[in-house]
Amino acid sequence: MQKKDAWLLAGLFGVTLSTLCLEILDTRLLSVVTWYHLSFFAVSIAMFGMAAGALRVQLSGDRWKGDAARELLARETLMFAVAIPLCYLGTLVIPIPEGFSLRAVIALGLSTGLLALPFYLSGVVVTLCLTRCGGKIGLLYFADLVGAACGALLIQPLLEYGNAASTAIACGAIAALAAACFRLDRGRRPVLPVVTAGVLAALAFANHGSPPPVGVWYSKGKFVDPGDVEREEWNIHAQVIVRKPKPGPPIYWGPGSVPARFPDVDRMRMLIDGDAGTYMTEWDGDPASLEWIRRDVTSLPHHLRREGVAAVIGVGGGRDLLTGLWARHRSVTGIEINDNFIELLEGPFREYANIATRDEVKLVHDEARSFLTRDETRYDVLQMSLIDTWAATGAGAFTLSENGLYTVEAWRVFLDALTPTGLFSVSRWYDPRLVSETSRLLALATHALIERGVENPRDHMALVAAGKVATLIVSPSPLSAEDLAGVREACRTEGFRYLLGPDQDPEGEHALGRIASSHDFAELDAAVEDEWYDFRPPTDAQPYFFNLLRPAAAWTAMTGGVIERRNEAEIGGVLEGNMVATSSLMALVLVALIGAVGIISLPLFAGRPKGLSLGELGTGIAYFAAIGVGFLFVQVPFMQRFSVYLGHPSHAVVVILFSMILTAGIGSLFSERIGIEQSKRFPLLQPLSIAVLLVLWTLAIQPLIENTIQLGLFSRIVLVIAAVTPPSFLMGMCFPMGMRLVAQLSPDALPWMWATNGAASVLGGVLAMGVSIWTGIDTGLLIGAGCYAFLALVATRLSKAGARRRACETASS
């Protein structure tokens, strides 16, 4: 490749950087404007859009090749740059109503079209660069992947500095600079692209500082009144909207039934991604004015332990911190994964909430499990109330930030963080008429206690309910007579319901009694056995606490069958969220399958590429489908496994995406040094080595996590990068190797192979998520290993076909 081609590489780098930024941004946008289970549709939209762009290039025939292809790059990229902010703004004005209706279908269709258009244009540009402009495919693919890796790094600061709209406009500015590079590649002055980039950059800065900035106008189908918004914050975790303050009676999650009258309080409602709610309460700093908070069942552990050392998992608006201050604890530590909540409490609302002003309060921006593993403090109370933000509850198993708090390994950490008589308190939604997480919560506590060598787990816990919330308290030591008297006193004075404890048998809740009375793992397994519902304690390898429906039950319900119920109202609440999430996932699998088959087969109507037999075409398609599916069956489990280990889901996404894509790019570049076309053994041994590495990695991951989670964040990031680098480096060689092997047979087929890879990646992503839910994360990795083992077979066939072709050409000459 000539030196002047540096502008071509720079342009490709800019296009893929802005493309990956936009892809991640769209998942955040759909989380806000619609429901979480549809946010993952953004990835499918992106990949299908790019695959459609590749098909456009394939069907263009000989018209887009060489210099003609390079002439198109600047124009198509500039269209991509302008389309990004315009399509984003268009999506903001479309309300997407709840439920299934013609209006909802039309709204989703319009939004999908707007979101897909920029990726279609990006797909055209990337395919032209990789397959029609000439040059070394390993070097071109290296520039492609390095750009995408940098996009994974850039999205977080862009969102945290500004908001979603500013980030979208900034992505357009970056794409416009890429168009300028393509103009320079052709020896032309890039006036229009540079002016466009400048205008878009100015708009991005102006929107960030405007009062108010352009924001989301419709969330979950409802209009967001900007006049009722006190403040709006964005980051990689969520959008947080703070409503204007309003006076009113205290807000309770699980109020006791004993009537009580307390003075009104001023409070601000805080919405997370437009729907999940918490509150920030104005407080004068006097603990005596917090007496109202004792009526909530989430305050139960503070009735039993006062003036001690407490910690709260999930700060939110500070409600549980106020409970700790009401109990006059000497120290109250709040651990929050979303730093926007801490910044609001310490910054603009410091004097309003009066929490960060207290000497006994310590606010920590970290993931609770990671922090408590390193923290040497031992707590009298560790409280975790309703931590799910509806992301996990509504989307079933699609989120991991909350699910990682409800595993056997996590509770091992939480119980170790207590003093010998400390209390770990967990509050969850509860309705005796519905199947809820309470049975699984109790099973998790029982398993954790049995693992610690406790002979009678029931002596160590108590379950109390009020309203639609149940609070479970668990202790490393048996609850004392004083503790049990305190529980009964709180129930009497506040109107709570004592459901289960050492001195209380459950009324009508026979399953709860059987679970809590288990003395070993065999008894616990028998107690949680259910044909329809999964009450087993989750583990890090299968951490989906909120997904209660077994696959057979989900399939039966979705196909019109009847799930056996203990009462008529049983399907509701969390299970409705499970049904929506599961049906959405299955619908995505179906859409991905249909889309993949359509994209792969559509070029057949235009005829086979010149010089390619039907068998060779099938082998090429199988090759690129295998690397598309296989890569995602490795990437998705990597992100899931390291989500808790790195402390933040955002850390896992950024570190895994950046390190895997960058290392794969280096592997692609290195592949140019290998004579793949002439080697007989490399196409066989290279994919097999990936499969072996993935099997070994699957066996080693849990010991690695358990033995190093106490290290600092930087050390853990280095270990993750070291762990994923070897397989990623080898996987990066597979794409250029396949392109070179197919190019021996028919260069005209290369855009088709690129489209096949993109379509198969969509299918691989949704299948990897489903496999993780139903069979465990490690199973997904083993399937990924199987894909690369299969790749060795088809790569060998392609290599042999190329050798035969060369032999024929030599003989004919």
Image (spheres, rainbow, N blue to C red):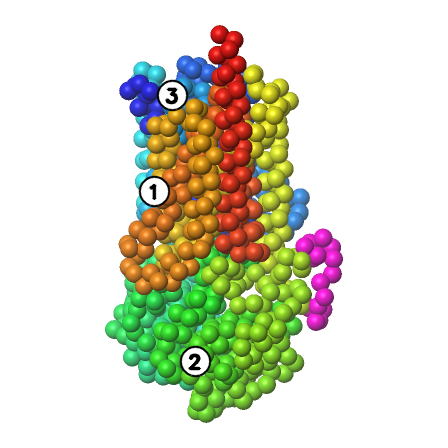
Percent from the top left, x then y, of residue 613?
Answer: 60, 21
Marks 1,2: beta carbons within 8 A: no
Residue drawn where x is 35% and y is 23% of the image: 8
Residue drawn where x is 37% and y is 28% of the image: 674
Seen in the picture, residue 199 relative to 276 is either above or below; the reply is above
Horizontal side of residue 435 vs 244, given as left or right: right
Q: Amino acid at mark 1?
A: Leu
Give how far apart the Cα atoms at labels 3 and 1 are: 28 Å
Task: Tell me the residue that label 3 is attached to.
Answer: 135
Identify which residue, 528 or 350, lies in the foreground. 528
Quadrant hosting residue 199: top left
Q: Residues within 10 Å of mark 2 (few under 14, many from 20)?
A: many
Q: Which of labels 3 and 1 is toward the front?
A: 3
Q: Which of labels 1 and 2 is toward the front?
A: 2
Identify which residue, 330 or 611, lies in the foreground. 611
| Magenta-colored span | 555-569
Identify which residue, 387 or 641, lies in the foreground. 641
Q: Amino acid at mark 2?
A: Ser
- SS of the residue at dot 3? loop
Q: Amino acid at mark 3?
A: Gly
Task: Tell me the residue that label 2 is attached to.
Answer: 475
Task: Tell me the residue that label 1 is attached to.
Answer: 154
Quadrant hosting residue 158: top left
Q: Earlier in the sequence, mark 2 or mark 3?
A: 3
Percent from the top left, x then y, of residue 457?
Answer: 50, 81
